[in-house]
Image: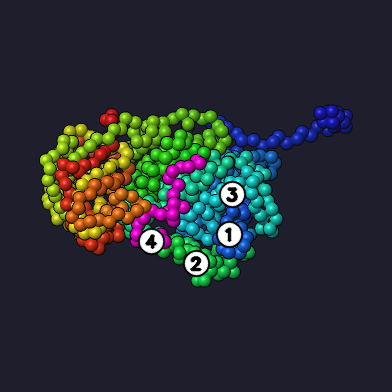
């Protein structure tokens, strides 16, 4: 202090004003949220290579993960910022977001000047760093893709560790580089595969991972490929896409470009060999949940310490709804701080169906969890639910508070609260039968399905949660695939997709190479007299467990129980609620070639529905 005072006195005696040290840059907050006070144009953009904890490509060295970073320039003058982190396999192949953005590094220095999605434009000026990392075996990262394997979670852990000074990374010259510019608090985000990695990372319990925002994400890879032993049609599509991704040559990085690609993903390279093994294993027709799937199952939420903001579409039949319900329930059992958005959309990002509200909410969530701002978002109702197309409701939790299970029995074409007389009804499996055929002509009998209907509803009925099917039946073959559908018979407004418009709006800062502007997208709706609300499947050999095969003795009666996936839907007054029981579902699953006949016992068969209180 004496030296500073003396310098000021000397400066004054010589006629000069004293020079004051520049104030240390700081985050600015107004109205409970961070403000855009840092230049996006001048932000630091750099690429580092985080050392993973795995050697998958057989070079006897830990694989290096190409990690692209954009952060405020003020982080070079003492500002410390939290990190928004996404790991993706798609930055070079299919791209990210509705406009399929890839990383742009046209100036040849191998550091992106355009980062996909709006996160960098919006959050960097507000005092965040954004980290977009190439998944192992894609673009500029070493290693091999593993289709949801543990290596991906370990890679995220290695990256969070580096951001907290517990691991090493290297610059382009091979020198070690530290993340001295960060507070160490990390929030992972991502849609689909990217969000699935966030789920996996949270189960490592790594310190520093403060929150995750999984959007339309997988929590259990078995449930992505199969349901109770029944294999989905896209079980073949996904490994095919996986093969396409791993075959991308990471030509953007001249040090790990064509030579590395040929050595690792060439026909005889270790990644191609490993990838072929994984693809074959994922498509195994046995359908059992075994150790392969155990390594890709995060649904128990063990070790999770990060808060979770979960987003899913109730009509997402890519990453089906049981991938969020099991995860959400496990988080609740473990007391994890959490928030949920459930829409009537499909495999869509909320940026494309509720943009303004999404950006506002995500901003407040990250400000609270990463900057520690007490803006009240943790005290608000936990759930935002689109209970009808275009109608959102905020509720204390999901399923809706006060929801109670009610039992409906399967009678002779009737779905009734009272137990009907005993009897039997049968159907024969048509392996080519579509869902449209299963649900059409509800007042006519069909040899290939059973349909049970309520009377016309005297008031609207909302279901909120997962439906349980419980039937007694015999099968005349050694196996059968079974389908259960929940159907709304009545004129309904339904989600029809999203429409991309020509007009744009802009979110955050801009540079010459990245303007932060995106074409507007809006949900579109239609009407229908028959709406399939939700679905669920069972392979009769897996009636006891998805892990074990139990032989089916033709003619013997079994108790068959499975779930129709979680949903939130309101059946209008005057509508009828329907349950369809059928065999192979040619619209979604690989057909059973045995063509069995299934005989269902009435009176002993039922469904349990989660009925929410009327409002």
Disc 1 packing (10 Å; few <14; some 14–19; many ≥20)? some
Q: Is residue 211 left or right of residue 539?
A: right
| Magenta part, dominant SS | loop
Q: Position of residue 275 (x, y in %)?
A: 47, 63
Query: Which residue is denoted by mark 4 in the rendering?
Result: 283
Disc 2 packing (10 Å; few <14; some 14–19; many ≥20)? many
Can residue 501 be seen in this snapshot? Answer: no
Which dot, 3 or 1, sits closer to the camera?
A: 1
Mark 2 and mark 1 lie on one chain; the one further toward the N terminus is: 1
Mark 3 and mark 4 lie on one chain; the one further toward the N terminus is: 3
Q: Which mark is residue 55?
A: 1
Q: CA distance from mark 4 to mark 2?
A: 16 Å
Q: Position of residue 32 (x, y in %)?
A: 53, 30
Q: Which residues are magenta?
A: 281-304
Query: Which residue is denoted by mark 2 in the rendering?
Result: 272
Q: CA distance from mark 1 to mark 4?
A: 25 Å
């Amino acid at each position: 202090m004496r030296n500073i005072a003396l310098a000021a006195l000397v400066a004054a005696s010589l006629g000069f004003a004293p020079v004051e040290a520049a104030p240390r840059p700081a985050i600015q907050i107004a109205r409970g949220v961070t403000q855009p006070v840092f230049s996006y144009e001048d932000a630091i953009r750099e690429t580092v290579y985080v050392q993973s904890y795995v050697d998958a490509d057989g070079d006897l060295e830990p694989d290096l993960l190409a990690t692209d970073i954009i952060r405020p320039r003020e982080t070079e003058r003492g500002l410390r910022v939290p990190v928004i982190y996404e790991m993706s396999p798609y930055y070079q192949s299919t791209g990210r977001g509705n406009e399929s953005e890839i990383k742009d590094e046209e100036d040849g220095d191998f550091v992106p000047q355009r980062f996909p999605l709006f996160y960098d434009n919006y959050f960097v000026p507000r005092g965040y760093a954004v980290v977009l990392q190439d998944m192992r075996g894609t673009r500029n990262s070493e290693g091999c893709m593993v289709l949801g394997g543990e290596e991906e979670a370990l890679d995220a852990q290695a990256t969070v560790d580096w951001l907290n000074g517990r691991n090493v990374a290297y610059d382009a010259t091979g020198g070690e580089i530290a993340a001295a510019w960060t507070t160490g608090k990390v929030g992972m985000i991502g849609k689909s595969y990217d969000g699935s990695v966030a789920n996996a990372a949270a189960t490592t319990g790594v310190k520093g991972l403060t929150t995750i925002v999984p959007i339309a994400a997988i929590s259990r890879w078995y449930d992505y490929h199969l349901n109770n032993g029944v294999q989905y049609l896209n079980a073949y599509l996904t490994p095919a896409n996986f093969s396409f991704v791993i075959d991308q040559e990471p030509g953007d990085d001249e040090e790990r470009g064509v030579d590395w690609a040929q050595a690792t993903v060439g026909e005889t390279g270790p990644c191609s060999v490993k990838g072929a093994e994984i693809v074959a294993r994922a498509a195994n027709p046995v359908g059992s949940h075994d150790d392969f799937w155990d390594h890709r199952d995060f649904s128990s939420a063990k070790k999770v310490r990060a808060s979770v903001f979960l987003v899913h579409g109730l009509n997402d039949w890519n990453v089906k709804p049981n991938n969020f319900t099991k995860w959400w329930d496990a988080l609740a059992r473990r007391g994890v701080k959490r928030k949920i958005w459930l829409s009537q959309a499909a495999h869509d990002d909320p940026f494309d169906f509720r943009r303004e509200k999404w950006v506002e909410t995500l901003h407040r969530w990250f400000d609270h969890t990463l900057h520690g701002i007490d803006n009240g978002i943790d005290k608000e109702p936990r759930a935002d639910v689109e209970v009808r197309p275009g109608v959102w409701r905020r509720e204390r939790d999901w399923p809706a508070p006060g929801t109670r299970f009610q039992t409906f029995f399967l009678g002779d074409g009737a779905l009734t609260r009272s137990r009907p007389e005993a009897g039997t009804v049968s159907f024969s499996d048509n392996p080519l039968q579509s869902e449209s055929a299963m649900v059409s002509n509800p007042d006519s009998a069909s040899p290939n399905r059973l349909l049970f209907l309520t009377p016309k509803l005297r008031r609207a009925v909302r279901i909120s949660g997962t439906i349980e099917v419980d039937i007694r039946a015999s099968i005349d073959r050694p196996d059968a695939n079974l389908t259960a559908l929940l159907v709304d018979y009545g004129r309904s407004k339904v989600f029809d997709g999203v429409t991309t418009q020509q007009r744009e709006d802009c979110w955050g800062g801009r540079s010459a190479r990245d303007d932060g502007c995106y074409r507007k997208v809006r949900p579109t709706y239609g009407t229908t007299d028959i709406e399939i609300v939700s679905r669920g499947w069972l392979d009769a050999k897996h009636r006891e467990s998805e892990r074990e095969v139990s032989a089916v003795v033709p003619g013997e009666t079994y108790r068959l129980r499975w779930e129709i996936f979680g949903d939130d839907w309101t059946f209008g007054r005057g509508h009828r609620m329907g349950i369809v029981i059928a065999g192979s579902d040619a619209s979604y699953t690989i057909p059973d070639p045995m063509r069995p006949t299934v005989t269902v016992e009435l009176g002993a068969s039922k469904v349990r529905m989660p009925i929410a209180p009327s409002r």
